[in-house]
Every structure is written in structure tokens, then in C-alpha cells.
Amino acid sequence: MNLARAHLHGDRDELPADVEALRQRIDGLGPWFHNLNIGGVWTAPNHFLGDYPGEKFRRFADHLPDDLTGRTVLDIGCNAGFYSLEMKRRGAARVLGIDSDERYLAQARFAAETLGQDGIEFRRLDVYDVGALGEQFDVVIFMGVLYHLRHPLLALDLIREHVAGDMLIFQSMQRGSKQLLDVAEDYDFNETDHFFESGYPKLHFVEHEYAGDWTNWWVPNRACAEAMLRAAGFSIEKRAEDEVYICRRADRPYEGRAGSGAVYPERHRREAE
Ligand SMILES: C[S@@+](CC[C@H](N)C(=O)[O-])C[C@H]1O[C@@H](n2cnc3c(N)ncnc32)[C@H](O)[C@@H]1O
């Protein structure tokens, strides 16, 4: 039985005999955020965003390299591994999915194993700790994580400094205007009008909760998402979907000047031990 094929093509005639047992196992690992078709059982059929992230992926998949043969991929905030699985399917030699939440990693391992997708490693690691990997990847996926972070620009800086070898596939929830103001290189101290323009880069701070989720901290508008990518040292090659960008590692503005990149706050020795 080829469950990988069943996942990708929704093949219903290749269902395992004991679908009920599979459903129970899947329920036991829930709740799921990724709606995966594992042997004919959908993991999150009532997702508030519909068939997520499959529906979103289908809107930008054609903009990604079809053949990743020999390439290495790091999927940051991999969740149940939807994108890791898709990259492996495109032939990537090595796929590493990291997430800070062990429950999602258990889902990802189960999905990969059940779908017969060998060669994907899932590891618990915080995005702020990517330096510990000591390795650069041809493709880094950083989708749906930025707005969950208290320190979003630091995360982008760390990704650029430690793991982004070439391509970054980035997505963030965006709120506010989709307009892009033609921002000047500099403004006089007394010039303030541009701050009131909806197309000026704005990062909205969520003090309490958004959509019932206290882990939503900062939500950029479109101009801000794009400006943050550039400020961290990524050039935007393509806006592949409303919120999805294909970027390349590029020069970082103000490179070499103190405070222009990642910082490494020192922990108290006892805390770090
Ligand atoms: C909205 S989901 C996005 C999942 C997937 N990347 C996607 O686009 O469908 C956010 C994921 O990021 C993970 N995450 C949140 N904060 C993280 C952090 N500091 N380091 C690593 N992963 C994190 C969550 O556990 C969750 O799996």
C-alpha cells in the first residue's frame, strides 16, 4: 500500500484496512493545525481556514522549484510537517523540520512515517536557537511563525546569520493596508506625515490576544513584512501569494555597524546551566 501516493492524490482505493484504528491514532495526537490526508483520514477536517495549508499551498506551489534533488531544506515552525513533506516530495536530499512544540513534532513524525516518507528529521528547536544547528540550508521555510514571536526581527536576523544559504520561503499573517508607500531614505525630524500613511511599514502590537491566541504578538502590514525581510538581509524575488514571499539571501543594510544584526543576550550562568 502506498500511503504517500494516497496522501498526495487523495487516492481512496488505497485506504488501510483498519481506517478506524488510524482515525483513533490521529485523534489521539490532536488537535491538529495541519490538515493532512493520511491514508484517507483528514487530520483537521474542520479547520477554521478550510483545507489548510493545502489550499494556500496550491496558490503558490507553482512558484517553487519543482526539483529539489540534492538540496537541503530547513522548515522552521514545521508543525505537522506539511511543507517538509512537500519539499521531500520534490526530491530534497535532506529535510529538517524544527518546532518549539513537541506535540506538533509527534504529529509530524507520525505523518511522515505513516506516509512512508523516509529521510525527514523532526527536531525540537526554537527559532532563536537555529545557530546551534551549525549548518546552512539551500532552502529555509519560515512560514506562519513571525507573528507568534515576541522578537520577530531577531528571528529573521538569526535565520539570515546562521541557516539561510540561498532561498527563504517566508509567510506572515498580515493585517492593515496592502498599499506600499514609496518610503524615502531619510526624513527630517519634524516631518511626521508619512507615519500616518497606511502604506508606511507598520507592525501592530497585540498586547492581549488576537483570534483567541495569546501567542500572536506582532502583526505586520504588507509594507512592514517586506521591509523587515529587506532589513534582515533578504531580497524579495517574488511575492508568490498575498502573504508568501520567495526571497534570496542578500547583503544586509548597515552590515558591520553595531546593532545592525542579531544580538545574543547573555543568560545568567545558573539559568543557562
Ligand atoms: C501557525 S503555525 C505555522 C505552521 C507551518 N509553518 C505553516 O505555515 O503552516 C506556527 C508554528 O510555529 C511554531 N512556533 C511558534 N513559536 C516558535 C518558535 N519560537 N520556534 C519554533 N517554532 C515555533 C508553533 O509551534 C507552530 O507549529
Image: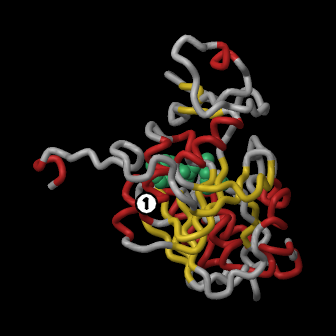
- State the image coordinates of residue 15 (x, y, percent, origin top left): 80, 78
Residue 32 shows in this picture: no
How was this image coloured?
secondary structure
Query: What residue do we see at 65% from left, 31% from top?
Result: 184
Local secondary structure at mark 1: helix
Residue at the far left: name it: 270
Residue drawn at (38%, 52%), measured in percent from left and top?
Answer: 256
> Which one is in front, 224 or 112?
224
Other residues around mark 1 within 10 Å, as few (<14) / some (14–19) / many (≥20): some
Relative horizontal placement of residue 123, taking residue 39 as reference (left or right): left
Quadrant placement of the C terminus = bottom left
Q: Position of residue 170 (x, y in %)?
A: 64, 54
- Residue named by callout 1: 161
Q: Residue 34, relative to residue 39: is it above or below?
A: above
| Quarter of the N terminus within the rendering | bottom right
Q: Is 18 above or below relative to 147? A: below
Q: Residue furthest top?
A: 190
